[in-house]
Image (tube, coloured by chain):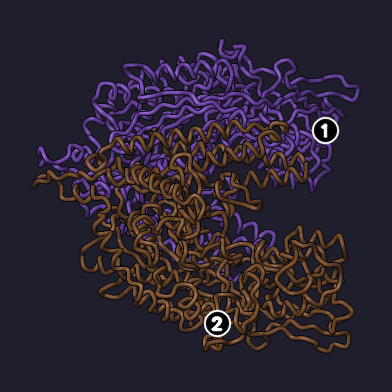
Chain colours: A purple, B brown
Amino acid sequence: MPCNAIGHHKGAASLWLKCTFVMDSSAAVLTVGILIGHYGIDKSSDSAPTWVKDLSKDVDENLLEELLSEVDKNRIEENLRVLTKVPHLATTAGDEQTVQLMLNRWRDPETGLDQAWREEFMVYLSFPDPDRPNKVTVVNSSNDVLHTAREKEKAYTPDQENAAVVQPYAAYSPAGQVQGKLVYANYGRMTDYQHLSKLMNLRNAIAITKNGRTGRADQAINAAPFGILGVLVYTDPLDMNDGFMSDANETYPHSWYMPPSAVERGAYASTYGDLLTPYLAAKEETYRVPLKDVTGIPPIPIQPIGFEDAYMLICELDGKPAPPEWQGGFNCTYNYGGPGFRSSSAFDNSDVKLDVFNYGEVKNSSNVMGVIRGSVEPDRYVIYGNHRDSWVHGAIDPSSGTSVMLELTRVLGKMVKQGKWRPRRSIIFGSWGAEEFGLIGSSEYTEQYFTKLSERTVAYINVDIAVQGNVSLQAAGMPSLQNVIFKAAKQVKAPGLDSMSVYDKWICYSNRTSPVYGLIPSLGYLTGAGSDYAPFVHYLGITSLDISYTFDRTKTRARIYPAYHTAYDTFDYSSKFIDPGFYTHQAVGKTAGSVLVRLADSLVLPINCSDYAESLEAYLRMALILFEDQLLAMNISMEPIKHAVANFRSASNHLEQVIRSSDLANETPLKLRKINDQLMLLDRAFLNPVNLQSKFRHIIWAPIQITTRTFPGLSDAYFRAKLSRTDAAWAQVHLLVSVISQVIEGAAHMLRDVI
Amino acid sequence: MPCNAIGHHKGAASLWLKCTFVMDSSAAVLTVGILIGHYGIDKSSDSAPTWVKDLSKDVDENLLEELLSEVDKNRIEENLRVLTKVPHLATTAGDEQTVQLMLNRWRDPETGLDQAWREEFMVYLSFPDPDRPNKVTVVNSSNDVLHTAREKEKAYTPDQENAAVVQPYAAYSPAGQVQGKLVYANYGRMTDYQHLSKLMNLRNAIAITKNGRTGRADQAINAAPFGILGVLVYTDPLDMNDGFMSDANETYPHSWYMPPSAVERGAYASTYGDLLTPYLAAKEETYRVPLKDVTGIPPIPIQPIGFEDAYMLICELDGKPAPPEWQGGFNCTYNYGGPGFRSSSAFDNSDVKLDVFNYGEVKNSSNVMGVIRGSVEPDRYVIYGNHRDSWVHGAIDPSSGTSVMLELTRVLGKMVKQGKWRPRRSIIFGSWGAEEFGLIGSSEYTEQYFTKLSERTVAYINVDIAVQGNVSLQAAGMPSLQNVIFKAAKQVKAPGLDSMSVYDKWICYSNRTSPVYGLIPSLGYLTGAGSDYAPFVHYLGITSLDISYTFDRTKTRARIYPAYHTAYDTFDYSSKFIDPGFYTHQAVGKTAGSVLVRLADSLVLPINCSDYAESLEAYLRMALILFEDQLLAMNISMEPIKHAVANFRSASNHLEQVIRSSDLANETPLKLRKINDQLMLLDRAFLNPVNLQSKFRHIIWAPIQITTRTFPGLSDAYFRAKLSRTDAAWAQVHLLVSVISQVIEGAAHMLRDVI
């Protein structure tokens, strides 16, 4: 099925031609790594050591096809059903059930892994108090309660009635009882509060904000300096539901849209990893930072509510109408608030009262780990992970990923147990705990095994929300992994289609024009900390990939599937509205499985440094356009970055030339290892030497505040300097230019001839 | 010659017996690595790839013997003569001459290396102003100058008359003209100033202090908080000259003792590396910290003087006699000073005036680099380095090391050029610039090639002051290198002796009893930043060794050879009083050469992790004795460290068991590589994860303020907490316990089976 049949109506024929052409040429380029070594040693005799042949083995494409054909959608469906039977919030009984499930599967004598075990960390979590639920009320001056927000989401299936459904809350919000006049603060960004503060005194007010355009923690952090006492946050139906609001016939269970009472839970700390033990694995005796010294916890109480309650509040607000870009999906005008409600309202002169009884607790959270030991290079790891904990039933987040992972480990484990296959490199599977509280399980893992993982990990593959739609692959990762995800995506049929590959559909929904390859699917960047790839990317500097399948973004404003973090993210929801038949889960499983096996088995690692060069060149072009004139005016030369990027390009080209021109299967295995080490360690060279004591050390992907497609640290520093105009701020820009130059030069040195 | 003949008279016979026994048993243990692979593949046939044999080659002991026999003392002598013809202070014309010399030698078509080049860094140096020499004077209230300290050292040979001899000065002392009443402050330690401040008001005084018991920078840093305006520093004849003071017949040119006018120059910044570009290689466009923000520069002027001038000042001081432990070698009582001189003195009521005209300048400093490319594992580096710059002629510091390095590179280069030998791993030689200003050349090198060096360097060998005496080897380094330096030391005859090895003499002068090996030579620890090993050890975490030959410390109080950093550190001095005949230079060359070749050629890296375990166990025992009771009282358990050390021990034993029981020469070369990577990266695991933004990151060796033979960070934190008794200080102790546990557990993980 050509692209035009699935949405692109204009110029479909020529696009189709372009597509086919591109695929051929990029396929040719991308298979270079695979062709090498095809003519391995076949002159074996008694006198050649037996290991010579093993060492020169490349990916067995036939075996890989066989392996992928084993990925069974019905089993994935069954996995999902059992994983989502009960809510499995981190460290609860439901979580423990999933621990046991993983261990049983991974220890299965017929289909399990070589080894599986649990690793526990004692981490600081935050929960609502079941005996004193958090409350949001409207109270008048006589303290009469005029309105109480729902404490539970409405039940449409037995799932929502499960006693283990946690009350919607903002994890890490401090406990506190605050009340004040309500103001509407749009998305709770700093600019939103600044705008409001020019119109009224915000002191002692309560703000109500919408989810979606800023970090969760920021909504409270931004509010506090203005004297705001507490924040309510909700998801506006315009942002998530394309305006649909009625659960009579519009929202779930009638569609994928969030029902009026649905509430998005979330962690509201501004950093990741256990908050009490930064840089240290949270073991029993580990030193813990006193709570008063912990940074990144919201300064004031914050509580999420459903849009049905938000509607009751916002539509009653006094004050001037907020500007058009602040308006949302309710059938009323969004006023700023007086602060407070308008006099014609039943809530006239009333306060909004916020009672948050969250408490913090250090609890045992488990990662479940499993491995398949590598045959030739056991000390090289390909890590495949996903978190196991969910806010409620988590059918999509994270169990779509977990159900796929369990099927992949079954297929791979069976091959291993049958003696049909063993990867060249070791594969480590991680089922992380407490991700929802801030990527805690994966962070503690990277902290505990810091050096070992830094030195040995070839790549990290994250499949968290494997399926939130059935239209297109959505992948993000280092540009150097573009070739391997493309190769995998070409190998797998799009869900339910025989005539198009995952790649074919991907390129139609998300594409870009590469100077080298022409039109190709667009691989996203891992700049944020949205899932467990963050500690691998930003802390360890490990080449990573995040894989999922998504919906058609041209057809909805939803930033994510609408049941996200609510009590409606259930098996029922997923199997009805996200992936009926589980074809998409299967396609993601095959795609991720192909990437995994290629990373584990390829003779030459499928890490393409010249694709990294292309991204750096694009970053550089953008940086020159955005910054160069102004920097020159400040006597800051960008020549060192130009030099570094050019150097990286030439080193990349040279290394790929060496790979292409070498018969690596027949040369000393140490030559191959040397090249693979160069590729493996490439991203490590990008860690920021002047900001090593940080969880955002990867200079190419973080830290990012202002989204530009260029060096994020430089971009942030530049815009800060433009605003503040101080010498110190420009000095920071100059420092960043030096840092970026040095790390890129350092990466180029890693790729060059080793001496 | 047994030990008793060279100093140990008591129980000599039994010691000798013990010595022989120990040497036999440890030799057996230590050669295990070498024996492995001895029976390499000899069943070669047409069908086995040709590289199979190369990959299994171990150190060729015959070739090594041949190689060492080529090390020629006369050539070393000639090297030293040419290296020390003129002063070669960093970045001066003399320095450039040595750059050219190195390049010429290393590019020699018959005896040069594979490649040699220079690398320039633009670094911040500090010099006295030749047009306005620094002055130390005594001035009375009418501003008459009653005494002027010497501006140049007295000439005994033409060397001292060379116009390029730099005036004695304290590099990085700020310029400034200060005057005040003189006080005597012993060694200028914080405790010394505290003691003084209880006796008198130190505000506006000038202090005079002795070199030797604290860091150079500390003498001024410690003084400033008391309101002291400037510091004079000198070397007391008691500390360095065993009391000898007269140049008529006692000091140089009559002996090795420093003449009365000799002045020890030095850098007085408190950190290492270029001060303006921390963590970044100092290239032309690199961001530079504004001078006002640079940390580690002395807050007040400081100037060194000779003891003849110090005598004139100290013996005239007023005030009470200083305590016995403050007294020195002068034939007068050391009084504290009134402040100021006593009324019976010609200096009565006079000030001491200090005019420092030092200026800072960013200058081009060169490292000269040379390499021999490895045949089998070119991407594994053994780095051998020494600085090239000296304060004046630097015959001992650093040219004893450089003359030896040049001879070693000649011998190795010739072997390579003749096709007789090529190391398994690459050897990199570094002739560092500007070490005297704070290890600058080596630091910038480690900053520029941070990732590459971290990932590929097997070991760093530093030979700076190769020879400052002819009595005993003095080596310091990671315990894991003990075995290879022992092996080398046993292979080489002690200077001028046929019957004793370097090892035999070493064990007699410096020894300890190991639980495993019995009596063995004592390998020192690289805790400080005294030479170019510091950036390798403390910043990169690279297994390192510092090698030199020294004098008999039982026979002198000198902390170092007395001409250190003076204009008397010349060829004349070295050839007359340090190593007549150059036998010792030759022995050091052979010893270092043997270590170098073993590290470069051994099939299994001669890095012994169980010797590291022994040191950690000793650290732990000491920590338990010193800290455990008090820590328990503060609710801090040391169990995690005990657990970690035990774990490290068992992982070490296990790995060595694997090495012993494997036929690594005949197994896949990747198994060997895996083990070697485990050994190579061991020290990297010890970098402090909560203090990565630091030049002292190696938790086992730094940072150290209080010298105890235990975990230095813990020890410092403990004693701070004992003093301050604050919760925050005890929290730091707990944090250190957690950090130490985690890094040792991490190191154990590196050594364990890889999955």
> According to the image, label 1 marks what residue?
A181
Check disc 2 and report its element: helix, strand or loop: loop
Q: What residue sits 59% from the left and 74% below the top? A: B125
Per the model, the C-alpha gap separating discs 1 and 2 is 90 Å
Q: What residue sits 24% from the left and 59% below the top? A: B63
> Residue B583 occupies which quadrant of the picture?
bottom left
Q: What residue sits 77% from the left and 71% below the top? A: B207
Q: Is residue A614 above or below residue B250?
A: above
Judge whether residue B455 can be spotted in this image. yes
Confirm or deny contact between disc 1 and disc 2 (CB under 8 A): no
Disc 1 sits on a residue from what chain? A
Foreground pick, B579 / B523? B579
Q: Is residue A645 left or right of residue A49?
A: right
> Residue A655 occupies which quadrant of the picture?
bottom left
The quadrant the C terminus of chain B occupies is top left
- Give how far across and how far down residue A86 sits, in percent: 54, 14
- Give how far across and how far down residue A707 sits, in percent: 56, 49
> According to the image, label 2 marks what residue?
B253
Q: In this view, does B685 lie to the left or right of B632?
A: left
